[in-house]
Image (cartoon, rainbow, N blue to C red):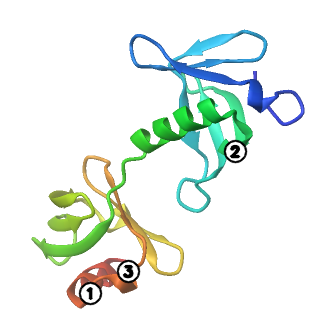
Amino acid sequence: MTGSAVDVDFAQLQFSKNDWGQLVLTLPDGAVHAGVEPIRCFPLSDPDRTISIVDAEGHELVNLPTLAVLNPGAHDLVRRELTEREFMPTIQRIVTTSAPSPPCRWDVETDRGMTSFQLESEDDIRKLGPSGAVVADANGIRYLLPDINQLDAASQRTIRRLI
């Protein structure tokens, strides 16, 4: 079942957690789907709109125009699930790099503390809007740079060389 504003009353969607910690969706017709995941369709450019709820096989069950259409309990649970799924530390400073261009190791200061990661390719740095970027490390962890202009001069030089 794929939901739209015409055939699903989003306020009647029920979300809960089962004994294994999986998110469970109960549709208005009583159908229960365990192991569902909420996925933001536009996580960086428009994070509060268009959230897809997919089943354990990745098939879309419902497409929410926004979390605001859900009842308060469902809204809070789905928002918590999205937060856990979208771990993305913000880089505040590039401390050192092992080489001027990839592959290289970066030591960075993030909003969650110091960390190191391997940058495999220039393709792992994506420009985001006029002054932002997203960096993906060799393990697939993404790091956010919301505004390159807010970084110190040395960090700015490192990033600008690669994008």
Question: Dividing the picture into quarters, in which one does residue 64 lie?
Answer: top right
Q: Residue 157: which numbered mark, if any?
A: 1
Q: Is residue 48 depicted above or below 146 in this figure? A: above
Dots 2 and 3: beta carbons under 8 Å? Answer: no
Sequence-first tag of 2 and 3: 2
Q: Point out which mark residue 148 bears.
A: 3
What residue is rendered at 27% in x and 55% in y?
Answer: 137
Q: Is residue 85 left or right of residue 78?
A: left
Give the residue furthest to the right.
Answer: 6
Quadrant location of the N terminus?
Answer: top right
**Placement of 25 over or under 76, stated as above or below:** above
Q: Are marks 1 and 2 in contact (CB under 8 Å)?
A: no
**Nearer the camera: disc 1 or disc 2:** 2
Q: Earlier in the sequence, mark 1 or mark 2?
A: 2
Gap in Å between the C-alphas at discs 1 and 2? 41 Å
Cβ–Cβ under 8 Å for marks 1 and 3: no
Please name the residue shown 63% across and 42% down the image.
51
Crowding near the residue tagged with mark 3, few <14, some 14–19, many ≥20 C-alpha atoms within 10 Å: many
Picture layout, residue 124 above or below residue 57: below
Q: Which of marks 1 and 3 is in front?
A: 3
**Residue where numbered disc 2 is placed:** 68
Q: Along the line of sight, which residue is nearer the eye, 29 or 77?
A: 77
Element on which disc 3 rests? helix
The local crowd at label 1, few if under 14, some if 14 to 19, many if 20 or more residues have their Cα within 10 Å, is: few
| Residue 81 visible at all | yes
Residue 60: image quadrant is top right
Q: Where is residue 147 in the image (x, y as percent from the top left)?
A: 42, 78
Quadrant containing the C terminus is bottom left
Q: Position of residue 88 (x, y in %)?
A: 36, 54
Whether residue 66 is visible here, answered yes or no, is no
